Amino acid sequence: MNAMEEKAKEVVRGVCSLDCPDQCGLLLHKEAGRIVKVEGDPAHPITQGAICNKVRHMAERLYDPARLRYPLKRTGKKGDGAFERISWEEAIETIVSKWKTLIATEGAESILPYSFYGNMGRIGAEGMDRRFFHRLGASRLEYTICEAAGTAGYHYTMGGSYGTSPEDTVHAKLIVMWGINAVSTNLHQIVLAEKARKNGARIVAIDVHRNRTAKWADWFIPVRPGTDAALALGLMHILFEEGMTDESFLQTYTVGHEKLREHVKSYDPAFVSSVTGVPVEDIYELARLYGRTTPSFIRIGNGIQHHDNGGMCVRTIACLPALTGQWMHRGGGAIKGNGSYLEFNKAALQRPQLRKQPARFINMNLLGNALLELDPPIRSLYVYNSNPAVVAPHAGKVRQGLMREDLFTVVHDLFLTETARYADLVLPATSSFENHDIYRSYWHHYVQLQLPAIEPYGESKSNPEVFRLLAQGMGFEEEALRDSNEDMIRQALNNPANPNLEGITYERLREEQYVRANVRPLFPGKLPTPSGKIELYSKAMELKGLPPLPTYTPLPTDEDKDLPFQFIPAPNHNFLNSTFSHHAKHVRLEGEPKLYMHTEDAASLGIQSGERVRVRNSRGSCELTASVGDDVLPGTVVSQGLWADEEGSSRLVNALTPDRVADMGGGAVFFSGRVQVEKLENAG
Ligand SMILES: Nc1nc2c(c(=O)[nH]1)N[C@H]1C(S)=C(S)[C@@H](COP(=O)(O)OP(=O)(O)OC[C@H]3O[C@@H](n4cnc5c(=O)[nH]c(N)nc54)[C@H](O)[C@@H]3O)O[C@H]1N2
Ligand SMILES: Nc1nc2c(c(=O)[nH]1)N[C@H]1C(S)=C(S)[C@@H](COP(=O)(O)OP(=O)(O)OC[C@H]3O[C@@H](n4cnc5c(=O)[nH]c(N)nc54)[C@H](O)[C@@H]3O)O[C@H]1N2
Ligand code: SF4
Ligand SMILES: [Mo]
């Protein structure tokens, strides 16, 4: 290698932009202007150089021949995927003239932005986009697809997304992974738990599926879907009954403990066992283990809250650490999410005052309804950072909506996703390594910066760039629509309402890369709940017509109530939601989409492992490969992964998922659907 080539080699810092709690620090190895290798950065205080297998192959995704280089215009039928290249000028001009006409004839509310966190960079995911759509006056999207129900439930109890500091969890002596498949979805929590295990900690997994995390745990407790609140109430029953509660903590830092003590008397272990499927002895054993171990830590996952009763379920589990005073012990407590510690200045970032008049809110979990039934109708949909044709519930309805000839759809993405195939215009997006953005984890306490590490791929543009162009095209004059990314990063960091961010500046981030928020222990202290305490009894919930005390509510039954199985279509190990589902390496590692079912259920249907099955209900059907055994309880079937569309068969699990909303926060209920399973030969 000559000196010139050597000089062209360089290693720069990066952030993993994916929607994953770990938010790893990365080292991007560059050669001749291209990223050739992605590694973990050992200097990141929490992730310490370890990254998952998904992202180790990121360089291949960046230069995948299928990556979009130019704007495209549809030439075939919606969904066919036939497009021709156009210029950016034509793309922007087409959108602007269409939207100007729509605003003049039907009003700006006929335009709906649809996005999520395909890239967690805050400027791209909730910065210039929000400013632009406020100014435009578009309908407002409610961002409910991921953690909304559980977050609402946790906030009623704790006042915000405040939990244990992840680095402290190495001190825990009991770790409960509750409805989280952390081996796949929160790798570094597993690394920390392994350290705790070496120091004598016991690890329990409570799940509906013997997934990778359940196999790794010391004790796996299988439960029936949607019954975890009953289990938690059963544990409380025993904690109070056997005097394992911390009375001084309850007195000082909680409200409603007397009412709760009375209330949980009705959740006796025999009843709880009949609901959850957990044997009475195991309920006692778990309660005594939890009641007698300090510090104990609960990692509350997303799985339990993707149910009709998900908000209440998370709230109920979130009450447990208070009963034994775990918040007073380093490493004790719980994490549902830690996002509130790092809350940026949302108003400065998003500028809601740019909106001139109120507009309707549309829950993203009801996208199918919004496109098919809303009056006045949605006439234009602008999608970025998300792939709703695959990830949204009741996908059949969503796709039917996307087929509407009179719907003007624009999709901005790095790839021609399933959603993009329905678009009138497709815009090529830069990858996060081509962008200038700021990141904050929803699990650990570090803020990170991404500087553009490489040139934009082809003619691709970042989200903020496109919105600046659209604002210009629309003739919007406001300064806020011209701010640079650096301006917006500075504005986001300047948040007097959040003292944890004090001293975190753009300059410091450039200098230090990993800057920790000034997080102090929650107790002794005052929570941002109405009472300032942990609300075991919540007046705020009562006012909303919700049960004020933690309560178990059975999953509602719908038109599928007579179907025999509860269907849990969860994420998988090698994809991130639908991201990577098109990449051969990730698909090969994952194998094929399976349906895990219990031996007894399979036998009664004449199904054996490896056989193709059709899963169906009133909403739709999909085809998977049976995996028979005791990884799930009878009556539960589980699949993993949001698989790419395939010619000739449907692997679209969301064809079956209900588009109801959960008990709180307008959350999604992906895991509350019921289904029938048939051997494919017999299915007709
Ligand atoms: N590899 C990988 N990592 C990811 C993702 C991915 O797709 N793949 N997605 C990212 C995103 S956006 C998110 S939100 C997180 C989600 O990651 P997690 O917080 O782990 O949540 P899920 O994977 O949705 O569900 C976790 C487990 O809940 C179980 N479950 C379902 N219903 C119930 C129930 O009623 N009770 C109990 N006890 N368990 C139940 C399922 O078996 C599932 O394995 O992961 C992030 N990280
Ligand atoms: N059945 C079932 N469905 C689920 C879930 C489940 O567990 N089961 N999980 C749900 C959850 S928790 C979530 S969070 C959602 C996630 O759903 P989505 O947010 O839709 O996640 P992805 O499928 O990863 O799609 C992200 C898209 O954004 C694109 N993208 C990445 N970076 C950028 C960028 O900078 N600009 C633009 N314009 N595009 C970019 C990617 O290429 C990708 O196509 O899925 C939900 N759907
Ligand atoms: S997906 Fe998660 S674990 Fe993997 S590199 Fe990104 S942040 Fe780290
Ligand atoms: Mo999510």
Image (spheres, grey):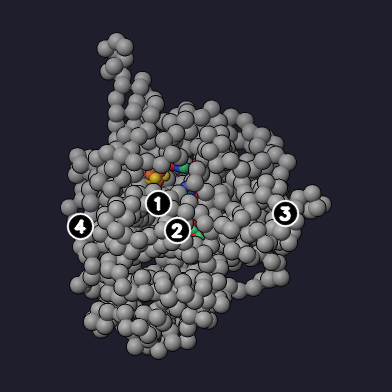
Mark 2 or mark 4: which comes first in sequence? Answer: 2
Marks 1 and 2, how far apart at CA? 8 Å
Lateral position of residue 274 relative to residue 622, left or right: left
Residue position for label 2: 180
Residue lying at 52% horizontally and 67% vertically, measured from the top left: 223
In front here: 637 or 674?
Answer: 637
In the rendered structure, find residue 607 and report the number of the disc placed on it: 3
Mark 1 or mark 2: which comes first in sequence? Answer: 2
Does mark 1 have its CB less than 8 Å from ligand 1? yes
**What's the amino acid at mark 3?**
Ile
Residue 643's place in the image compared with 135, above or below, is above
In front here: 266 or 284?
Answer: 284
In the rendered structure, find residue 624 and report the number of the disc placed on it: none
Disc 1 on helix, strand or loop?
A: loop
Residue position for label 4: 518
Residue lying at 31% horizontally and 15% vertically, measured from the top left: 5
Q: Position of residue 389 (x, y in %)?
A: 60, 49
Question: Foreground mark, 1 or 3?
Answer: 3
Marks 2 and 4, how far apart at CA? 27 Å
In the rendered structure, find residue 186 and report the number of the disc placed on it: 1
Q: Position of residue 163 (x, y in %)?
A: 31, 64
- Crowd band around label 3 with a 10 angstrom C-alpha radius: few (<14), some (14–19), many (20+): many
Q: Which residue appears farthest toward the left when viewing the image?
A: 503
